[in-house]
Amino acid sequence: MLAITIIGLSTTLIAINATMAATNLEKATFAGGCFWCMEHPFDQLSGVISVTSGYTGGHKKNPTYEEVSAGGTGHAESVQVVYDPAKVTYEKLLNVFWHNIDPTTKDRQFCDAGNQYRSAIFYHNEAQQRLALQSKAQLEQNKPFKGSVVTEIVQATEFYPAEEYHQHYYKKNPIRYKFYRTSCGRDQRLRELWGSEAGH
């Protein structure tokens, strides 16, 4: 059953890549701790075509959730966003990313600790790298909090979609999702960092 699920997700990713090649769509990849919590902020943006939870930045091919969450594969829980740059800019995606993470903690996001929960921007080309570095520099100058920004900006490597039950978890299991966000202290910490801009 797991093999069938992985094959199905791989087929979906191939279809998305084919669609991107035939259009002017682009992709962006971000890690901000639990990928359940990073889907919704991008999902609700006009111009975003799809958001996929998965794993990237590691050294093992086709890692499972159990392997990644154990911390031995080097991957970060992440989301890959396919978007139409004519409708939503990469700068907008960066802004949404920053306001949904804690950029001051290394190898941790809220209650989740470990390298697999690090915050990172995985750039896909030189333009994304330049814009990501600029946004980080601007944040350092204008941040509304005291801590240093430790979020990584690194080149994107192969992205592996997570198991199907993780995809759009906030829609499939809204009560459990809300309980997790609350018990993990995510929203409280975001408000402490960003004030009224938290989550936007």
Image (spheres, rainbow, N blue to C red):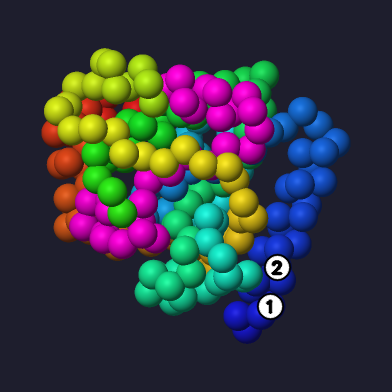
* Image side of residue 195 versus residue 54, left or right: left
Residue 59's disc is: none
Towards the viewer: 96 or 153: 153
Q: Residue at x 78, y 52 (%)?
A: 15
- Magenta stretch containing residue 77, yes or no? no
Do the CB atoms of the residues marked 1 and 2 lie less than 8 Å apart?
yes
If the image is split into quadrants, where does the C terminus sit? top left
Query: Which residue position is annotated with label 2?
Result: 8
Q: Residue at x 37, y 21 (%)?
A: 137
What is the tally of numbered marks visible in this picture? 2
Considering only vertical position in the picture, is 6 above or below 32?
Answer: below
Q: Amino acid at mark 1?
A: Ile
In this view, the residue in front, 69 or 127, is 127
> How far from the left and from the top, in percent, is residue 30?
48, 43
Q: Which residue is mark 1?
A: 4
Residue at x 45% of width, y 57% of height:
76
In the picture, which quadrant includes the N terminus? bottom right
Left/right placement of residue 137 relative to residue 94 reads left
Q: Is residue 51 visible?
A: no
